[in-house]
Image (cartoon, grey):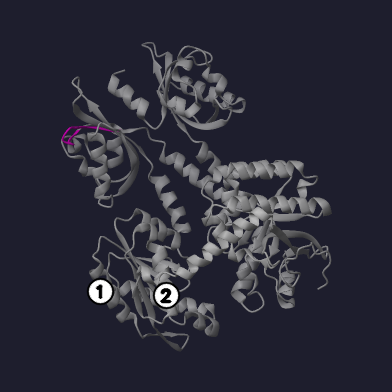
């Protein structure tokens, strides 16, 4: 094996191994990435300290043996195992994809195996989350079925070698590619900055890794994960470079589809707030503008939300018509549309948006035989990325409050009084934590079947120095900004367990993705559960489930609390697009239907239909449902009519310092 090829193997995004065709598969060679994969140095395999076969999961060993035997019997030169499990140095089981080549002697007898190992643990875990994810993973397997796509180029970037797999994928012949610059494969959508970074990296003698969008001879796009390695001559001079690719087209497209679902406004079918945040981060010198319809709330209240939705759709279509083509449009929420542009001068951007507003101002729309005239407010911001969206929202609030048609953010319009309030509540929170004036109040949850209050939700409260009970509205956000949130969460959990240990009633506490992925909080909660006499009475209500990014850590946490008998609920279900996906992946025992839907049950047929579908969905999966914000008898009766299992709200009982025992409808 030549040194450059071994270098490629040691830097490639997979592990490479050679085995003898003998029982136990003795290892002849292992590349450096095997240590990242399994935690063992390559030498431990090669000198016989470790047996590869003994690392294979007992449940997978027989199948792996049969797959090898089948390939040998059929005279195959290469084959691919179905994913199987290996035990790493830490004792964890990881899933691997193993593509193996069989080396035979002159008599056709197998003497060695070459194997390429990739860590598929996350993909397998994701596959198990839901039927939809299983379908995606099968497509991922198919997308990754091909072997490496390899090319070599000289120092000037001209292609000197391509392998057959790359030819088959791109549709080019070898003659058409040899001698051509690599730009022949470049897709115009890939930013020029990506290639500048790539060249700068390899010219500095470093390896570049990344995902690229390329173009076939036919013009069709495909995506690859590429490792680009500079190769040097005997004098240490840069001579050429080696490109190793794995096609990930289907993976990228499925990820794009999932990301599109999470980052697209359901109503307007354009990118939403999450997509805007990502776009700002990725953009080169972005600027923003926001359009907000005046009196939109009154239109919704008078004509109904479906009427308002139609108005917003008509308004969006006209924004598309009048805006510059290169400006990207996002739906921030409600009636707010945001336009993002890159590398544009402030004067030009302001002029274009002012012209856009003039085209939209006093435009009349006929909806359900009602003529509506719109007057949008325009706000602009040219702040740095880390303050761009925040400053835009501040500018819009200022414009609406002071009745300006158009405004550009300036530091003078920022609200010092709000900063003063933040400082005030930060100080109050710090002192309350020191004085042990953080407590919990308890809101009852009514069971329709038993007609009794059966559990309570624990809600954080701050007792001020004058004994006033303070809602978390005033201090919860401040706690997150001042890094007191974890201390607050620990205190609430301790208080809740202490209170209900005495009374023995089932209870629930709120927990965020931040809590579940913070080891110190997880350790604290597990200690409370271990010390609790009835952990089966505890339910964890997962807040902000759509904000979960580290699903692996969250699932590990949930598995640990479930082992102790604890139950899981998803809060505010129905408020966002991805809730069904989150429900399936988190395997909840309860869902708490979002209050914005429950409040409209008695008067809004759309809300009623949505809640009915949620209840049907949950019931088919054996998940109990809880209605929040049950504020009066009419809503209480609607909830019962929909066969929702539990009700919670001020009609049942407000949060109190002591658990409520009785309720009579």
| The C terminus, quarter of image | bottom right
Going 48% across and 85% down the picture, which residue do you hit? 368
Q: Which residue is mark 2?
A: 398
- Secondary structure mostly seen in the magenta stretch: strand
Q: Residues within 10 Å of mark 1 (few under 14, many from 20)?
A: few
Query: Is any part of residue 129 visible from this angle?
Result: yes
Q: At numbered mark 1, what does the secondary structure look like: helix, strand or loop?
A: helix
> Relative to residue 98, is residue 604 depicted above or below?
below
| The N terminus, quarter of image | top left
Report x, y in % for residue 203. 22, 34
**Magenta residues (range):** 150-159
Q: Which residue is mark 1?
A: 351
Report x, y in % for residue 369. 46, 88
Position of 661 compared to 654: left or right? right
- N-terminal of the pair, mark 1 or mark 2, is 1
Q: At numbered mark 2, what does the secondary structure look like: helix, strand or loop?
A: helix
Position of 624 compared to 292: left or right? right
> Relative to residue 384, is residue 162 depicted above or below?
above
Report x, y in % for residue 221. 31, 49
């Amino acid at each position: 094996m030549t040194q450059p090829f071994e270098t490629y193997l040691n830097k490639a995004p997979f592990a490479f191994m050679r085995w003898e065709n003998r029982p136990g598969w003795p290892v002849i060679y292992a590349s450096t990435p095997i240590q990242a994969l399994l935690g063992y140095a390559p030498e431990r395999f090669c000198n016989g300290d470790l047996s590869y076969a003994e690392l294979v999961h007992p449940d997978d060993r027989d199948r792996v043996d049969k797959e090898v035997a089948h390939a040998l019997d059929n005279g195959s030169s290469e084959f691919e195992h179905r994913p199987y499990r290996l035990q790493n140095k830490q004792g964890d089981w990881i899933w691997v994809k193993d593509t193996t080549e069989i080396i035979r002697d002159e008599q056709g007898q197998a003497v060695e195996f070459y194997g390429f190992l990739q860590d598929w643990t996350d993909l397998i875990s994701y596959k198990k989350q839901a039927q939809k994810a299983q379908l995606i993973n099968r497509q991922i397997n198919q997308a990754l079925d091909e072997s490496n796509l390899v090319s070599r180029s000289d120092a000037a970037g001209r292609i000197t070698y391509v392998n057959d797999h790359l030819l088959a994928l791109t549709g080019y012949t070898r003659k058409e590619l040899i001698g051509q610059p690599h730009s022949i494969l470049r897709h115009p959508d890939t930013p020029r900055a990506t290639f500048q970074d790539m060249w700068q990296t390899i010219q500095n003698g470093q390896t570049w890794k990344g995902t690229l969008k390329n173009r076939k001879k036919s013009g069709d796009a495909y995506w690859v994960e590429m490792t680009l390695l500079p190769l040097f001559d005997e004098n240490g001079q840069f001579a050429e470079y080696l490109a190793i690719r794995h096609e990930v087209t289907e993976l990228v497209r499925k990820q794009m589809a999932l990301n599109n679902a999470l980052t697209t406004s359901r109503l307007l079918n354009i990118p939403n707030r999450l997509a805007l945040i990502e776009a700002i981060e990725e953009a080169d010198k972005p600027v923003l503008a926001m359009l907000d319809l005046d009196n939109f709330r009154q239109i919704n209240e008078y004509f109904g939300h479906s009427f308002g939705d139609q108005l917003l759709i008509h308004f969006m279509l006209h924004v598309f018509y009048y805006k510059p083509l290169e400006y990207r449009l996002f739906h921030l929420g409600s009636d707010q549309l945001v336009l993002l542009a890159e590398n544009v001068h402030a004067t030009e951007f302001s002029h274009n948006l002012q012209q856009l507003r003039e085209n939209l101002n006093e435009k009349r729309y006929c909806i359900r035989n009602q003529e509506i005239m719109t007057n949008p407010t325009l706000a602009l911001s040219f702040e740095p990325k880390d303050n761009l969206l925040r400053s835009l929202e501040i500018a819009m609030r200022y414009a609406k409050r002071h009745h300006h048609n158009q405004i550009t953010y300036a530091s003078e319009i920022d609200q010092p009084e709000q900063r003063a309030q933040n400082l005030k509540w930060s100080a109050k929170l710090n002192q309350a934590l020191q004085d042990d004036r953080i407590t919990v109040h308890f809101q009852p949850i009514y069971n329709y079947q038993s007609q009794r209050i059966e559990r309570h939700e624990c809600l954080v409260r701050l007792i001020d120095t004058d004994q006033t009970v303070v809602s978390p509205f005033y201090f919860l956000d401040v706690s997150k900004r001042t890094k007191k949130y974890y201390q607050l969460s620990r205190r609430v959990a301790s208080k809740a367990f202490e209170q209900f240990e005495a009374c023995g009633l089932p209870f629930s506490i709120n927990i965020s993705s931040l809590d579940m992925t913070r080891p110190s909080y997880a350790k604290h909660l597990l200690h409370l559960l271990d010390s609790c006499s009835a952990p089966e009475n505890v339910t964890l209500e997962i807040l902000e489930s759509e904000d979960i990014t580290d699903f692996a850590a969250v699932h590990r946490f949930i598995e640990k609390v479930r082992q102790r008998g604890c139950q899981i609920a998803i809060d505010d279900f129905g408020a966002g697009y991805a809730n069904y996906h989150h429900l399936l992946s988190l395997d909840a025992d309860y869902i708490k239907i979002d209050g914005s839907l429950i409040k409209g049950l008695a008067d809004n047929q759309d809300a009623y239909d949505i809640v009915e579908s949620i209840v049907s969905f949950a019931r088919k999966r054996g998940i109990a449902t809880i209605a929040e914000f049950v504020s009066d008898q009419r809503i209480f009766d609607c909830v019962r009519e929909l066969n929702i299992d539990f009700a919670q709200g001020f009609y049942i009982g407000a949060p109190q310092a002591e658990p409520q025992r009785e309720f009579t409808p």
